[in-house]
Structure formats: C-alpha cells, structure tokens
Amino acid sequence: MADIKNFFQSKGVITVLTLLVLVLFLYSIGNLINLVLFTFIFAFLMNRFQTYISRYVNRIVKVDPRIILVFMYVIFLSALGLVFYKYLPIITMQIADLITEIQQFLRRPPEDPAIKFVVDSINSLPVDIQNNMTNMKSILSYATGVGHVAFQVMLGIILSLFLLL
C-alpha cells in the first residue's frame, strides 16, 4: 500500500496526471477555446497597457487604475466602432464594383486576341448548376465564419474587461 502511495506522490506521476487533466479540460471546452484565447489575449494586452499608462498618470495625479481601464476600453471600442462605421460600407461598395466590372468585362471584352482567347475559354466551360450552388454555399459559410469569429472577438473584449475589473 505504501508503494502505491509513493508511486502517486512522485513528481513524474503528478506531472502526467496534471497534464492529462489539462488536456481533458481543453478538449471539453473545444468549441469555446477561441473565446477563451481572445479573452485572455485582450486581458493581457489591456492590463499591460493600463499598467504602462497608470505609471505615467500617477506621477501627475493619483487615479484609480480601474477608471483608466474603463476609459481605455471606451476609447478602444469607440475607435473600433468608428472604423467599422467608416470603412465597412467602402469595402462592400468596392466588392460590388469589382463584381460589376468583372461582369462588364466578360460581356464586352477588349479586342486583344489573348484576352479574347481567355474569355472564350471561360465561356466554353460547362455550366453546372450544382457546382455553382456548392460554390455559393462555400462563400456563404465563409461569410458566416468571419461573422462568428468577429462575434467571438467582441465577446472576448467584453469578457476581458470584466476579468480585469
């Protein structure tokens, strides 16, 4: 009995068991791992930045670090919202213009023989509706994946604020 107790108290067994428990925990939260990583990355970065700012502000006037932290998050989220508000419509308009330009190019290609050969080759490809639907589904799944990651980033930012407060 003492041998079994000594075996489980050895450093190697404790290390392996700790690693095993950690792997099982990470496997169990597999769907949330991105959210956990984003939360801790933002918490680490904002804590470092808050400590840096607090050091210089406290030389002038004593301020509670939590006030500086909330102020930093307000500025960060406002700047992020402003960037989305200003540049998201521009990006969507540019993508729509690009699609329109490609369609116009394919309808009326220039008289260059090389371009005419490429356009004729594209037009001679068999049009398969099932293949086009598969491509549209992959584009839609990509767009929803980007939206899902953006949602996780925003949630990670908010959770990191609560973690630091």
Image: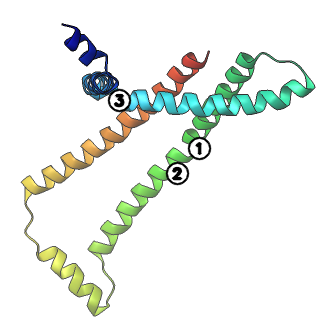
Q: Tag count in the figure?
A: 3
Amino acid on which the number 3 mark rests in the picture: Ile
- Answer yes or no: do the residues labelled 1 and 2 have beta carbons within 8 Å? yes
Taking the view exactly as shown, the residue that stands out farthest to the front is 2
Residue extending farthest right: 60
Q: Indicate the quadrant containing the C terminus: top left, top right, bottom left or bottom right.
A: top right
Q: Is residue 29 visible?
A: yes
Q: CA distance from mark 3 to mark 2?
A: 32 Å
Task: Judge the density around disc 2: few (<14), some (14-19), many (≥20) Cα neighbours within 10 Å.
Answer: few
For mark 1, what is the residue?
A: 86
Which amino acid, by three-letter code, is at mark 2?
A: Ile
Q: For this view, does 121 lie left or right of residue 130?
A: right
The kind of secondary structure element at disc 2 is helix
Q: Mark 1 to mark 2: distance in Å?
A: 7 Å
**Tag 1 near tag 3, CB within 8 Å:** no
In the image, farthest residue toward the top: 1
Q: Which mark is residue 90?
A: 2
Within 10 Å of disc 3 (Cα), the crowding (few <14, some 14-19, many 20+) is few
Q: Residue at x 26, y 25 (%)?
A: 20
Residue 44: quarter of image:
top right
Pointer 1 local density, CA inside 10 Å: few below 14, some 14–19, many at least 20: few
Percent position of residue 36, x then y: 41, 27
Q: Find disc 3 in the rendering and name its residue.
A: 33
Secondary structure type for disc 3: helix
Instruction: Give the spatial CA distance, label 1 vs label 3.
Output: 31 Å
**With respect to residue 133, does 72 lie above or below?**
above
